[in-house]
Image: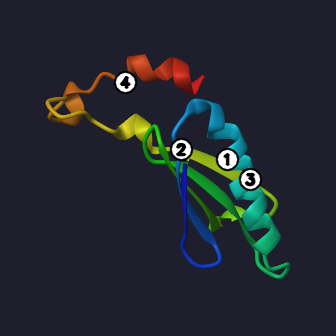
Amino acid sequence: MEVHRNGIGRLRLTIDSRSQLEEVLDSAVAELLSRQNPNTPEGILVTRHDHRTFTVQFSRDVQRGIVLEQDLRLWAVPEGGPRGREDFNCAPALPALC
């Protein structure tokens, strides 16, 4: 596992195993909460970039007191994958969203 701190309000995490996932993300969120200025309106945004890489950061787009998760993997297209939107079948991803 690697943690890169970028200033006071952003952590970039690289997680080596699934068994670490929840513990590491919970710890990162707790670390940011401990640094949060009581006068700022930002909440915390947790973004999954791929199966191992996450960022945890303050965001003005998230209401204070809320931790919002977003997963960018749904839009990743493997090399040799669909060339255009019309070629993309999102049906396999739908159960993950429900």
Looking at the rendered image, the disc whose residue lies closer to the viewer, 1 or 4, is 1
Instruction: Estimate the spatial distance between the alpha carbons at disc 1 and disc 3, rounded to whole Å.
Output: 5 Å
- Reading the image, the residue beneath label 2 is 15
Instruction: Estimate the spatial distance between the alpha carbons at disc 1 and disc 4, rounded to whole Å.
Output: 30 Å
Q: Is residue 79 above or below residue 27?
A: above
Location of residue 28 in the rendering, given as x and y in whole percent from the top left corner: 69, 57
Instruction: Estimate the spatial distance between the alpha carbons at disc 3 and disc 2, rounded to whole Å.
Output: 13 Å
Q: Is residue 21 above or below residue 43?
A: above
Helix or strand or loop: what does disc 3 sit on? Answer: helix
The foreground one among 38 and 90 is 38
Local packing at callout 1 (Cα closer than 10 Å; few below 14, some 14-19, many 20+) is: some
Tell me what residue is drawn at x 14 percent, y 30 percent: 80
* Residue contact at pointers 2 and 1, CB within 8 angstroms: yes
* Residue contact at pointers 1 and 3, CB within 8 angstroms: yes
Location of residue 60 in the rendering, given as x and y in whole percent from the top left corner: 64, 70
Q: Is residue 47 above or below residue 90?
A: below
- Reading the image, the residue beneath label 1 is 24
Mark found first going from the N terminus, 2 or 4: 2
Local packing at callout 2 (Cα closer than 10 Å; few below 14, some 14-19, many 20+) is: some
Tell me what residue is drawn at x 81 percent, y 69 percent: 34
- Disc 3 residue type (three-letter): Ser
In the image, 96: left or right of 84?
right
- Disc 2 residue type (three-letter): Ile
Instruction: Estimate the spatial distance between the alpha carbons at disc 2 and disc 1, rounded to whole Å.
Output: 8 Å
Mark found first going from the N terminus, 1 or 4: 1
Q: Which mark is residue 90?
A: 4
Mark found first going from the N terminus, 3 or 4: 3
- Reading the image, the residue beneath label 3 is 27
In the image, 33: left or right of 69?
right
